[in-house]
């Protein structure tokens, strides 16, 4: 019987700190004009001990229906909200290694195909219910009932005692530990039994619990008096306001209506203005975990032009990514042409890369039977309208005539989950080294997002399964590069995920009186606010 400790398991899976660092997004940093964010925070903290009380006010630009029932919440945008109220078995450190959270230890038996977790003692949910092995089992079953890919490989859960649970894997899968460990967020079993109680509230083990919200407008979280970390949280509450118009949000932040402001690359002018001000602390993820790419994904599951891979390749040749970066992102974006950043362990540099070639695009359309072109949609939220108008003009030049269909965030989110968008839609993809886990969340037939709107060719699905089963890190990376080529090769790729445009460098700006927020530090879409305090 072969048992692997948690750290050795990570090493065996090829997701060491070194591999994760290689996947980092273009040397991003956490800094202000005067020095590093860490040194700024340390300087502020040196003025006194942590202070209890106060409300942290955050301005967030991504609209979302605030989740209470966690199996419905998928994608990085939801994790910002989830990690205030809910916790998972493991988290990440700054180097991208898995570290204990609700679980203190774990071991993998590769012969038995099992993961045994040791759970943290003395943890209760916000309603007073104990967090124990039975609660873990109940949550895993709830995720499976909702067809979540993250738990699909768990064949059964055996409760050993209150603090130990064994999960049996249906198949060898090198991604299962991280998938189950990080992407399952634990709800009180009593709340699960009454799911309507989570329609407008949360009931987790996290430092704050949702007390008030309006979909896609705001969410207010208040201190969890049952939190398991002694003396924490310091804050009384956290208020998140959704402001989708970047100039409005920036103006309000600079007027100190908010303490923190999340800015994406859709607002490069705002990023430059805040950087040049030299008075704000800027926090960026530096280990590559959870970094997001932005692209255009065709709905290939619906019968029509986009069901043909030749048409999808034509679309990729028709878009001048460098011009888009220069015109709309001020050259600040890192570009890529596959599900990885250049230089990372799973980036395939030997495939045929797409270049801007409108004549090649026209030739491919004619080959596919669309010499006269066709009309389609580009589905988007408001923040991308100008950029997508420029892309629509490029596509129009080769015969792909686009109507831009602007929707609200909730509608876009629903399209992502049920695969019912028509034409093209903005594609957000988490860029991290383990394709079996991260690409699998979209490519798997039961994937959390986009999966119902794409085809699932045999070759790609077989490679995905081989990657998941592979326990040798070198062989796994080889297979992952084969999968990159199968999808993204300019001459033969299926282009299931369309054209990747750039890597979205998400930045969190804050005033220097906000201490120990840990925003984006370990995983770009999560944070631990339990020890956050306001030095003012």
Image: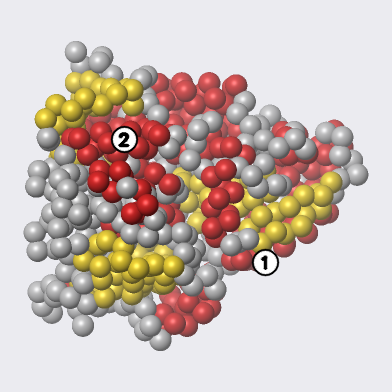
Q: Residue at x 25, y 43 (%)?
A: 189
**On the rendered structure, is 481 left or right of 175?**
right
Instruction: Measuring from the top left, give residue 404's x and y in whole percent.
Output: 72, 59
Specify the farthest residue to the right: 372
Specify the farthest residue to the bottom: 255
Q: Residue at x 82, y 49 (%)?
A: 375
- What residue is shown with label 2? 140
Residue 308 occupies which quadrant of the picture?
top right
Disc 2 crowd rating (10 Å Cα; few below 14, some 14-19, many 20+) is many
Q: Is residue 331 above or below residue 59?
A: above
Q: Residue at x 33, y 54 (%)?
A: 197
Seen from the viewer's position, the closer of residues 195 and 465 is 195
Disc 1 crowd rating (10 Å Cα; few below 14, some 14-19, many 20+) is few
Q: Is residue 122 above or below residue 163?
A: below
Instruction: Measuring from the top left, give residue 246's x and y in whole percent.
Output: 52, 73
N-terminal of the pair, mark 2 or mark 1, is 2
**On the rendered structure, is 344 left or right of 529?**
right
Instruction: Measuring from the top left, give residue 161's x and y in whole percent.
Output: 11, 30
- What residue is shown with label 1? 386
Residue 461 occupies which quadrant of the picture?
top right
Q: How many discs mark residues in the rendered view?
A: 2
Q: Secondary structure at mark 2?
A: helix
Q: Is residue 334 visible?
A: no
Tag of residue 299: none
**On the rendered structure, is 307 left or right of 10?**
right
Q: Secondary structure at mark 1?
A: helix
Seen from the viewer's position, the closer of residues 129 and 529 is 129
């Amino acid at each position: 019987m072969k048992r692997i400790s948690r750290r050795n398991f990570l090493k065996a899976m090829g997701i060491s700190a070194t591999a994760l660092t290689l996947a980092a997004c273009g040397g991003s940093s956490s800094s202000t004009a005067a020095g590093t964010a860490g040194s700024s925070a340390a300087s502020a903290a040196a003025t006194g001990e942590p202070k209890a009380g106060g409300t942290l006010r955050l301005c967030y630009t991504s609209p979302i229906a605030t989740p209470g029932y966690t199996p419905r919440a998928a994608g990085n945008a939801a994790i910002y909200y989830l990690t205030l109220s809910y916790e998972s078995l493991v988290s990440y450190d700054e180097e991208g290694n898995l570290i204990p959270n609700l679980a203190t230890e774990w071991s993998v038996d590769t012969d038995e195909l099992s993961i045994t977790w040791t759970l943290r003692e003395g943890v209760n949910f916000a309603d007073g219910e104990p967090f124990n092995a039975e609660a873990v089992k109940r949550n895993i079953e709830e995720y499976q009932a909702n067809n979540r890919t993250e738990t699909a490989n768990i064949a059964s859960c055996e409760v050993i005692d209150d603090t130990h649970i064994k999960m049996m894997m249906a198949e060898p899968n090198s991604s299962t530990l991280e998938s189950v460990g990080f992407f399952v967020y634990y709800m009180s079993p009593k709340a699960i039994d009454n799911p309507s109680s989570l329609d407008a509230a949360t009931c987790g083990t996290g430092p704050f619990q949702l007390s008030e919200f309006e979909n896609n407008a705001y969410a207010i979280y208040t201190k969890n008096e049952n939190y398991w970390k002694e003396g924490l949280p310091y804050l009384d509450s956290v208020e998140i306001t959704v402001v989708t118009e970047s100039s409005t949000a920036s103006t309000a932040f600079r007027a100190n209506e908010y303490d923190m402001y999340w800015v994406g690359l859709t607002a490069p002018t705002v990023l430059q203005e805040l950087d040049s001000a030299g008075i704000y602390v800027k926090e960026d993820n530096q280990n590559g975990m959870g970094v997001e790419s932005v692209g255009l994904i065709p709905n290939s599951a619906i019968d029509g032009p986009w069901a043909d891979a030749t048409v999808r390749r034509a679309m990729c040749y028709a878009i001048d990514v460098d011009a888009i970066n220069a015109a709309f992102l001020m050259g600040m974006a890192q570009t890529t042409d596959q599900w990885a950043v250049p230089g990372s362990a799973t980036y395939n540099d030997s495939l045929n890369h797409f270049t801007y070639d409108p004549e090649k695009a026209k030739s491919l359309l004619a080959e596919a039977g669309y010499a006269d072109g066709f009309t389609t949609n580009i589905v988007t939220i408001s923040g991308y309208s100008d950029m997508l108008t420029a892309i629509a003009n490029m596509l129009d030049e080769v015969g792909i005539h686009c109507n831009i269909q602007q929707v609200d965030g909730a509608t876009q989110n629903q399209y992502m989950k049920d695969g019912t968008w028509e034409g093209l839609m903005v594609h957000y993809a988490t860029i991290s080294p383990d394709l079996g886990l991260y690409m699998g969340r979209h490519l798997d037939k039961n994937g959390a997002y986009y999966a119902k709107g794409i085809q699932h060719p045999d070759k790609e699905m077989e490679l995905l399964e081989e990657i998941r089963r592979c326990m040798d890190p070198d062989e796994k990376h080889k297979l992952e590069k084969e999968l990159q080529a199968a999808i993204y090769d300019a001459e033969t790729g299926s282009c299931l995920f369309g054209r990747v445009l750039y890597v979205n460098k998400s930045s969190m700006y804050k005033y220097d009186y906000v201490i120990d927020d840990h925003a984006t530090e370990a995983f770009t879409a999560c944070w631990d606010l339990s020890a956050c305090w306001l030095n003012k």
